[in-house]
Amino acid sequence: MKKWINLTLIMSVCIIMLTACGQETAENNSDGTTTSGDVKEFVIEATSFEFDVKEIKVKQGDTVKITLKNKKGYHGITVEGYNKQVRPNRSISFVANKKGEFEYKCSAYCGAGHNKMVGKLIVT
């Protein structure tokens, strides 16, 4: 009888420990980084030579999700400093693991105003 009580007690402690370990908020990504911040979602609409979102502000460690919607023309986005590309009418996610200001710009030549299609990712 004492053997069963000890076994039950040991199993209960193990279950409690495993449950506690499984409730971490950090998430391991395939690139080896860890996500522990918030998820910040941004939908950017692209028209003729303009993005409707000029500035994206996040905190270091946040997961950034950018969705690009082409309203007029064919556009893509390159996020410099993070080497990330958003294809037309698609989304990407990445961890903002570097502090600073990073330019994002249209990655598909779209005409004479192409160079005006820029915005800024600010990571604090």
Image (spheres, grey):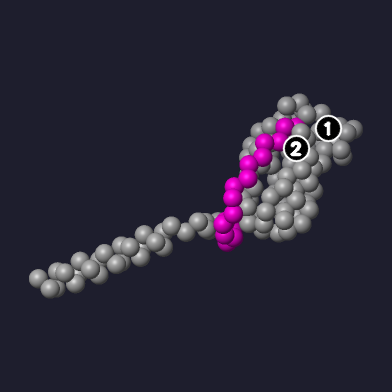
What residue is drawn where x is 73% and y is 58%?
Answer: 99
Disc 2 marks which residue?
A: 53
Give the magenta part as a residue range: 31-46
Residue at the farthest left position: 1
Q: Is residue 44 above or below residue 123?
A: above
Magenta: main secondary structure: strand
Quadrant in which residue 91 is drawn? top right
Residue 109's tag is none
Residue 39 magenta: yes
Quarter holding the C terminus is bottom right
Nearest to viewer (mark 1 / mark 2) = 2
Q: Where is residue 46 in the image (x, y as percent from the top left)?
A: 75, 32
Front-most of residues 107 and 51: 51
Mark identifier at residue 49 = 1
- The reply to whether residue 86 is visible in this rendering is yes
Residue 114: percent from left, percent from top: 85, 36
Residue beneath the point at 69% across and 42% down? 86
Q: Is residue 33 magenta?
A: yes
Q: Is residue 48 left or right of residue 95?
A: right
Q: Where is residue 98 in the image (x, y as percent from the top left)?
A: 71, 59
Identify the residue at image location x=12%, y=73%: 2
Q: Is residue 64 left or right of residue 21?
A: right
Label 1, residues with CA under 10 Å away: few <14, some 14-19, many ≥20 = some
